[in-house]
Image (spheres, rainbow, N blue to C red):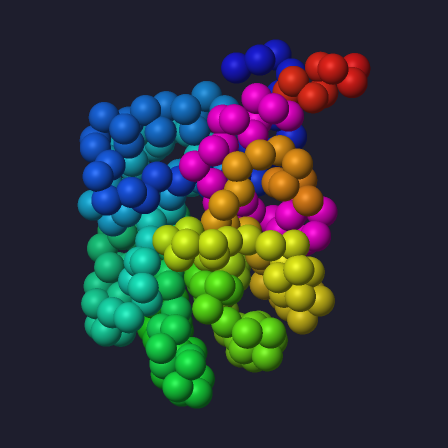
Amino acid sequence: MNFIESKIASFIDYTLLKPETTSEQIIKLCEEAIEYKFAAVCVNPFYVSLVSKILRDSSVQVASVVGFPLGANLTEVKVLEARNAVENGADEIDMVMNIGAFKNGDNKKVIEEIEAVIEASNLAEIKVIVETAVLNQNEKEIICKLLKESRVTYIKTSTGFIPGGGAVPEDIQLFKKILEDKIKIKASGGIQDLFYTRKLLNCGAERIGTSSGINIVLEEIEDRCRNK
């Protein structure tokens, strides 16, 4: 990597969740994550064991998704996914909340499921994906208040699988206002450049989920070289 170290790399969860992803692509993802010193690599459950072996002696964390991308799995399935991910080496779990249950007003079900996944994950950090693109302002405020009383580590904006849905500064600001420093914020979905990354971080995000991590870091290094 360039001799000028990146300041943004440590905020990035380097992500590859496409269904057609191959082992070769995952190995490359991990090698790049080590080289650029990203915070974590986020992959589907099938590849957690492989990623864990590659990253074992590095500072890069292993993140896996649960209930992805719809959140409509049964709780028992999410619990099994989370437990297996941790047993295979995951340090962090990005779970999709039960959006349908939340829309039904069954907040008790939503929180009980999140707590069940937390229990199954033991010491892993838990990020709850709320899929902001399908929530109105009032719903975003409600879910923030619910999560604020839970043991969740992060609230995460999006799966990135809904067209037009992604991280926007207004949501990050809202989350920060309600959650204060109780729960961290992960911005994810449609983040592809340095300008937008910086904007989201300045609004209060503490992790950035993106498949464009290298482009963002190289853009940052170029920008710092230009302004030296």
Q: Percent position (x, y) of residue 71?
A: 32, 67
Left or right of 137 in this view: 25: left
Q: Percent position (x, y) of residue 61?
A: 42, 40
Image quadrant in which the C terminus is located: top right
Pick out the residue farthest to the front: 164
Residue 75, quarter of picture = bottom left
Tell which of 157 and 94 is nearer to you: 157
Name the residue located 65 percent from the left edge and 18 percent from the top edge: 222
Would residue 140 be seen by someone viewing this image from the given angle? Answer: yes
Tell which of 93 and 144 is nearer to you: 144
Left or right of 225 in this view: 183: left
Name the residue located 46 percent from the left edge and 68 percent from the top edge: 134
**In the image, is residue 155 above or below residue 50?**
below
Would residue 127 be seen by someone viewing this image from the given angle? Answer: no
**In the image, is residue 80 above or below residue 187?**
below
Count of picture labels: 0
**In the image, is residue 40 above or below residue 98?**
above
> Is 216 one of the magenta-colored residues?
yes
**In the image, is residue 75 above or below residue 214?**
below
Q: Percent position (x, y) of residue 32?
A: 41, 24
Residue 34, quarter of picture = top left
Name the residue located 61 percent from the left edge and 24 percent from the top edge: 219
Q: Which residues are magenta?
A: 200-220
Pick out the residue farthest to the right: 228
Q: Percent position (x, y) of residue 195?
A: 66, 36
Name the residue located 28 percent from the left edge and 70 percent from the top edge: 72
Left or right of 129 in this view: 179: right
Residue 99, quarter of picture = bottom left
> Is 211 one of the magenta-colored residues?
yes
Pick out the residue farthest to the top: 3
